[in-house]
Amino acid sequence: MLELNNERFGEPVLDLADPAAMAAALYPECIKECDAYYCDMDISQGISYGAVLVDKYHFSGRKPNAEVCSALHGAMFKDFL
């Protein structure tokens, strides 16, 4: 896992997606970056079936329907963890 994340992020870090999501839900004050986007679920029968599609660049012109948190305050997250 450290090797994969070293390739993804440029340093050997652990990706704690589930604990980070729970921290954001239970302790919203630990959220550092969060933006509103229009999101949709792919229900086609293709390879991306079940994927969440995020209109990061607002190409669709549709009103945002979800907030996507992309960063937490590290020290606060560790305290909650």
Image (tube, rainbow, N blue to C red):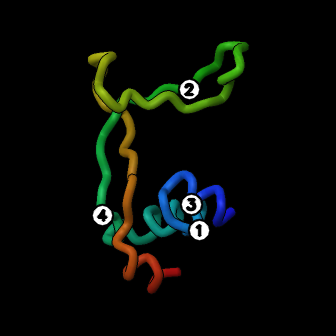
Q: CA distance from mark 4 to mark 2?
A: 26 Å
Residue 44 against residue 27 in the figure, above or below? above
Front tag of 2 and 3: 3
Residue located 39% across and 53% down the image: 70
- Can you tell which mark lies on residue 50? none
Question: In the image, is 20 to the left or to the right of 27?
Answer: right
Q: Which residue position holds label 3?
A: 6
Q: Amino acid at mark 4?
A: Lys
Dot 4 falls on a residue whose secondary structure is: strand
Left or right placement of residue 48 versus residue 30 in this view: right
Q: Amino acid at mark 1?
A: Leu
Residue at the location (44% across, 31% down)? Answer: 54
Sequence-first tag of 2 and 3: 3
- Between 30 and 2, the one nearer to me in the picture: 2
The CA distance from mark 3 to mark 4 is 22 Å
Q: Which mark is residue 14?
A: 1
Give the residue pinned by disc 4: 32
Q: Is 10 or 60 nearer to us in this picture?
A: 10
Please tell me how many numbered marks the rendered image carries: 4
Of the residues tagged 3 and 1, which is closer to the observer?
A: 3
Q: Quadrant of the N terminus?
A: bottom right
Q: Amino acid at mark 2?
A: Met
- Can you identify the residue that label 2 sits on? 41
Q: CA distance from mark 2 to mark 3?
A: 30 Å
Q: Position of residue 78 (x, y in %)?
A: 47, 81
Q: Mark 3 falls on what kind of element? A: helix
For disc 2, the neighbor class at 10 Å (few under 14, some 14 to 19, many from 20) is few
Mark nearest the camera among 4 and 2 is: 4
Residue at screen point 43% across, 64% down? 24
Q: Is residue 19 above or below residue 60?
A: below
